[in-house]
Structures are given as C-alpha cells and as structure tokens.
Image: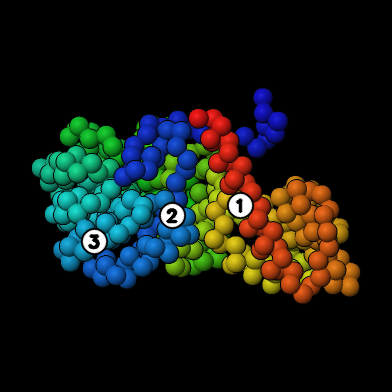
Amino acid sequence: MSIRPWRDIHRRHSRQIMVGAVPVGGDAPVTVQTMTNTPTSDPVATIDQIRRCEEAGADIIRVSCPDVESTAALRQITRAARVPIVADIHFHYKRALEAADAGAACLRINPGNIGSSERVAEVVRAAKANGCAIRIGVNGGSLEKHLLEKYGEPCPDALVESALDHIKLLQDHDFHEYKVAVKASDLFLAVAAYQQLAEQVDCPLHLGITEAGGFVGGTVKSAIGIGSLLWYGIGDTIRVSLSAEPEEEVRVGFEILKALGIRNRGVRVVSCPSCARQGFDVIRTVSVLEERLQHIRTPMSLSVLGCVVNGPGEARETDIGITGGGNGRHMVYLSGVTDHHVQDEGMIDHIVALVEAKAAEIEAASERAAIAAE
C-alpha cells in the first residue's frame, strides 16, 4: 500500500520499442513529442525550430515530409537534431523510403494509404534496414471510406478497427517495432477509442487530441483527454496538438505530466488566482517567474501566494515559497520553513536566485548519490 493511494496510477503494461535512442513503452518514462510547422525543405528554419523545442524539453520531434525536397533536406535535419526525428508520411510510399535512408528514427504512416501490400513491404524493409520504428496514425478526420460506410460516422469501433487493420499489415510483414495512435478532435471519441484499443493490443500508444484548437482551448481539451487517459494508466508518449508554436506544445505536455505526478521536469509552480488581499501583484509575478525559470530542468516546486490565508500552508509543501505580507514586506520559505523576508524591490530576482541555487543543490546531491552507488 502506498502512503497516498488516491494518487496512484497503475500504468498499462506495453511492450517497449525504440525511437532512435529513446525507449517508448514498457517501464520507460512517458515521452513528450511535438511537430515542426516550418517547411521541412528549409533545413535552417526547421533546425532552428527543432532547437527551441529541444530546449523546451521535447523528447521526440516530428517533421512533415510531403515532397522530395523535404526528404532531401531531412538528412541535414536528422544530423543536426539532438532528439529522434519522426518523418510524417502520407500517400507517397517513396517519401517513406527516402526518409528512412535520411536518418529518420520513426516513420509516421497509415499503412492503408501507402498503397499495395508490396509497397507496405518496401516501407517495412526500409524501416528494418535503417532501424526505424513506425507509428500507425489513425485519425477520426481521415478514416477509410469503407469504415465510414460501415459505421455511418467516426466512432470508437471504427477507429479501433482501422488501427487493427493497419497493425495486421505490419505484422504480416513480420514488423513489430510500432506504436499506434487513434486520434480525434472530439475528445470523447478519442478517449473511448484509446480505452478500447488498449484492451486489445500490447504495443505502445501515442496519445493526442488532434486539431484541439488554439493555445487556451486546445490546452484545455488536451488536458482533459490526454490527462484522463494517463490517469487511467493508458499512454506511453504524448503530443499536445495546438495552433501555437511547437515549443508551447512541449510545455503544455510536461505540465499535464507534472500535474499527474507522472514525470517532473523543471519548476512546478503553485500559485493563487489573487484577490484584494494580495500583498504583491501575483499574476505579473508568476508570469515573469515562469518565463525566467524556463531554463531550470531540475524537478522542484515553488509556491507564490498573495497573502497569509493559504500561503504558509502551501509553502510547507514546496521547496521554495513566497507569501505576501504587509507594507511590501513578504515572507520567504525554504523547504517549508519560514526563513527570511524580502521587499518588493528585487523580489523576483531574489526568487530566481533561490531557485537556481536550490536546483544546483539538488543536482549536486544527485551526483553524489550516483557516485556512491557505483
């Protein structure tokens, strides 16, 4: 029995595959993916965007390869990237062959729209020869005609049947290094399809609510859909689909994982919505701190509360806390204990310095522990 059983998540067991050097499934951490929106045929712009996504923490990055110019640029892109690159392929099987040869760690395809069985076989041979994984991507907006005729509309049964058909195409060619997504813009449909599929297959599942919308609306839909599935223990890798810059998708993805206690990276901020009791401008302070602390990767917690109603209680549960006081004088907590006071002027710089120092302390302790364990 755990100390807090209401927080336990019992993860679905799946077999593990490798996407480049990144394990997906099994007991590997849930990975966060995003997708570039620059023309892949422009390697400079694409690499620049990939670099920003890497800095935000992306584990895997997908690029679209709609034409031969894109796959021609892919070799330069995969060499420059620090994380595995997934090549997004639709319809043109030769693009998949070119992407595999150009260093893609994974091919995102719908085997059903690649063409004949022989073309699927060619893609599988290329994937095997180059050590590529394959991601089967089923989408509620592009279901096969015969399934729409059979079911009348996109529904969980239709998405799952499509996924199983695609899986069989790969298995018929003795290919098993695949993961599967059954995405839909309707979060109810997506969640139901993933739950149904999870009971029928043992492969890793890639989670997403596709075409979720803009930053605010898409974040909410994704948090509900992806978060629900992760809470059920379903999901091995996630992509938050937003009409926003891809690095924002990465940050939202990590926030979902952090909220569920599945994976921690960087500073987890606990803050109040503020009210007339606030001793400082909480909203502006949190906004600035989140921006200035993006470089911190060490998992830690920071509470920013405007007054003493909940401030001390929240601070007891975080590594560093600040609670608003009177006359521009605020209380600073370290490891849950009141440590000192700080004035309005220089408060943000002071908190940033405390976080950086705490991160360095945690990293040093981790290194010492690792050395002692050797």
Residue 276 position by quadrant: bottom right
Q: Residues within 10 Å of mark 3 (few under 14, many from 20)?
A: some
Instruction: Residue lying at the far left in this picture: please name it.
Output: 118
Residue 139 seen:
no
Instruction: Residue lying at the far right in this picture: please name it.
Output: 326
First-in-chain label (3 vs 1): 3
Q: Amino acid at mark 2?
A: Ala
Image coordinates for residue 47, horizontal then vertical, percent: 33, 65
In the picture provided, is 209 more to the left or to the right than 313? left
Which residue appears at 20% of the width and 50% of the height? 100
Which residue appears at 16% of the width and 44% of the height? 126
Image coordinates for residue 51, horizontal then vertical, percent: 39, 63
First-in-chain label (1 vs 2): 2
Mark 2 element type: loop
Discs 1, 2 touching: Cβ within 8 Å: no
- 352 and 93: which one is in front? 352
Q: Amino acid at mark 1?
A: Ala
- 187 and 118: which one is in front? 118
In the picture provided, is 191 more to the left or to the right than 82? right
First-in-chain label (3 vs 2): 2
Instruction: Residue lying at the far bottom in this picture: please name it.
Output: 345
Residue on which the image places disc 1: 360
Q: Which mark is residue 58?
A: 2
CA gap, disc 3 and disc 1: 35 Å
Q: Amino acid at mark 3?
A: Gln
Discs 3, 2 touching: Cβ within 8 Å: no
> 68 above or below 184?
below
Q: Which mark is residue 76?
A: 3
Quarter that holds the N terminus: top right
Q: Residues within 10 Å of mark 1 (few under 14, many from 20)?
A: some
CA gap, disc 1 and disc 2: 22 Å
